[in-house]
Image: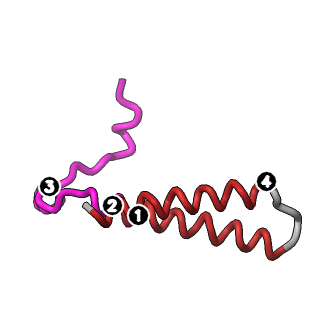
Amino acid sequence: MKNKQILKKRIQQKELQIKKLHLHQSSSDVCNQLFNTLILEKAILKKELEDLEKNPVIEAVKQILPKRKKLICDYFKT
């Protein structure tokens, strides 16, 4: 539970940094690289948070059950 709160705070910090950088963004390569790095770090933190929120029992059951494969003809059924 504590890890989730920490991740949420870190995501909020990244969002704030992105907003600040976006307001003061110039066309320099350094700013663009920093902006891209912040976006990537935020995405990684969101994925970690998503993984923490997954229920391991449900995920195990999902892997056991066979998935129905979609065929191209399934998209054209009316």
Q: Please name the residue that numbered disc 1 is placed on.
A: 7
Please give the range of residues in magenta. Answer: 50-78
Q: Percent x, y for residue 64?
A: 11, 61
Q: Amino acid at mark 3?
A: Ile
Earlier sequence position, callout 1 versus callout 4: 1
Q: Percent x, y for residue 72?
A: 39, 44
Circles 1 and 4, Cβ within 8 Å, touching? The answer is no
Circles 2 and 1, Cβ within 8 Å, touching? The answer is yes
Earlier sequence position, callout 3 versus callout 1: 1
Q: Please name the residue that numbered disc 2 is placed on.
A: 4
Q: Amino acid at mark 2?
A: Lys
| Residue density around tag 3, few if under 14, some if 14–19, many if 20 or more, within 10 Å | few
Disc 3 from disc 2: Cα separation: 19 Å
**Is 78 placed above or below 48 here?**
above
Circles 4 and 2, Cβ within 8 Å, touching? The answer is no
Q: Amino acid at mark 4?
A: Leu
Residue 53 within the magenta-colored segment of the rendering: yes
Earlier sequence position, callout 4 versus callout 2: 2
Circles 3 and 4, Cβ within 8 Å, touching? The answer is no
Mark 3 or mark 1, whichever is nearer to me:
1
Disc 3 from disc 1: Cα separation: 23 Å
Name the residue rendered at 62%, 56% in the picture.
16
- Near-viewer residue (67 or 54): 54
Q: Give the numbered dot on residue 23.
A: 4
Find residue 75 and report its image quarter.
Answer: top left
Q: Percent x, y for residue 58?
A: 14, 55
Name the residue rendered at 87%, 63% in the picture.
26
Circles 3 and 2, Cβ within 8 Å, touching? The answer is no
Name the residue rendered at 64%, 72% in the picture.
37
Q: Is residue 63 visible?
A: no
Q: Give the numbered dot on residue 58.
A: 3
